[in-house]
Amino acid sequence: MKHHHRIPLMLCSLCATSLSIVAQNTTNLPTSMYGIGELSTSDGGRYAGMGNIGIALNKPGFQNTLNPAAITRMDSTCFIFDVGASASYARYSFQNDHSSSFMGNPNRFSIGFRVLPRWYAMVGASPYSSVGYVIQTEEEVEGMPGSYTYSLFEGSGGLYRCYLTNAFALTKNLSVGVNLGIILGTVTQSETQESAIVEYESSKRAFYADFGVHYEFNTTGRQKWTAGLVFAPSLQISHDNNLTYSNSSTSDNLDKSYHSRTQYLPMHIGSGVSMTTERWVVTADYNYLDWSRNTSSYTSMKYENQHKMNIGGIYTTNPRYPRSTELMGGVGFSNSYINLRGGKMKYLEISAGASFPIRYSYLSLGATWRKQINSRSSLMQESRFSVNLNLTFGERISRAKLK
């Protein structure tokens, strides 16, 4: 156990890294101006090729961020590290106008380890939501035909979460877990018209908690069935808001705090089931997010409760080896929590990927194509292709497993 003195250094490094992970935008979607921005669909990980799925998945070397109870299969002799990054290309269309963007960012950093024989822990950081948009409008000046007033709306920033997960193997089949942490970040939004600029800066923070259960059923055949449940309560988001006004033509300036509507993290209920054979793992998740405690300050926008359904699979190429290449794929369908002028936005996602063993590590690559399906043609359309790269590796802390 001679490497235990490195734990404080690891945790300090993690906190420093978490700040850089989310300092950049991960979206250029105009609808990110509403609510708390565009929610992160996935924080990558070893099984990013299955999409955002894994409530019932508890596998060696997998740091599960979807169910805090499903990390009790980690190697007891190692600190397990996960480091990930993502890149995406998105294309937007609105009526006859088209635009595109390319983004790349780190999206995951976590450390998992076994504390005691039945106690496992994980600490990490990942993006939670992102704001990034540039919108320009023009309006004809009343009484002056041919004269226009131009306005520019810009937004940047987002929220990220830092978390500490604790999981306990109560029996051989039953595990429970709790995930505690904070969600914080700063969102800046501005409006520019002629020489006047109004900037709204909001620093947000919230306590975050979710609870999980994972159970492995006793079976006599070659198939092994597992199930998982998660729950996260709705918690209030605190704000520190500042408004800045400047006008270069009149030298008028204003700097003051302002009040905004109270926002809440959504209540989350999720369930999952998986079936494992010698070569195959097939798993399915359902997630429900309740946004009903939130109200919008925009007359054109209201909050919508979310339903997410995902199904995915893993194929092990050579199950006789303790470490083997794994191929994976998944399909997901969900709706946005933003409803614009009565129009609903839905998303179809198709993912594929592979995980390759390299000595005691895994190099994973996942690709996802996401298509926005809207109930009205007047809403902006989005299609996105993203790639996740993840490295899972361990640092051995003892020569033998904990008893």
Image (cartoon, rainbow, N blue to C red):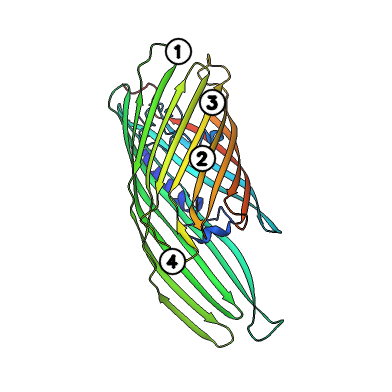
User: In the rendered image of this protein, does residue 280 appear above or below residue 293?
Assistant: above
- Residue 83 shows which numbered tag? 2
- Disc nearest the viewer among 4 and 3: 4
For label 2, the SS is: strand
In the rendered structure, which amino acid carries the disc numbered 3? Ile
N-terminal label among 2 and 3: 2
Q: Is residue 37 visible?
A: yes
N-terminal label among 4 and 2: 2
N-terminal label among 1 and 4: 1
N-terminal label among 1 and 2: 2
Where does label 4 land, which residue? 297
User: In the rendered image of this protein, does residue 286 appear above or below residue 183?
Assistant: above
For label 4, the SS is: loop
Q: Which residue lies furthest to the bottom in this view?
A: 250
N-terminal label among 4 and 3: 4
- Front-most of 255 and 89? 89
Where does label 1 land, which residue? 222
Query: Dot 2, how many residues are within 10 Å of its Cα: few (below 14), some (14-19), or many (20+)?
Result: some
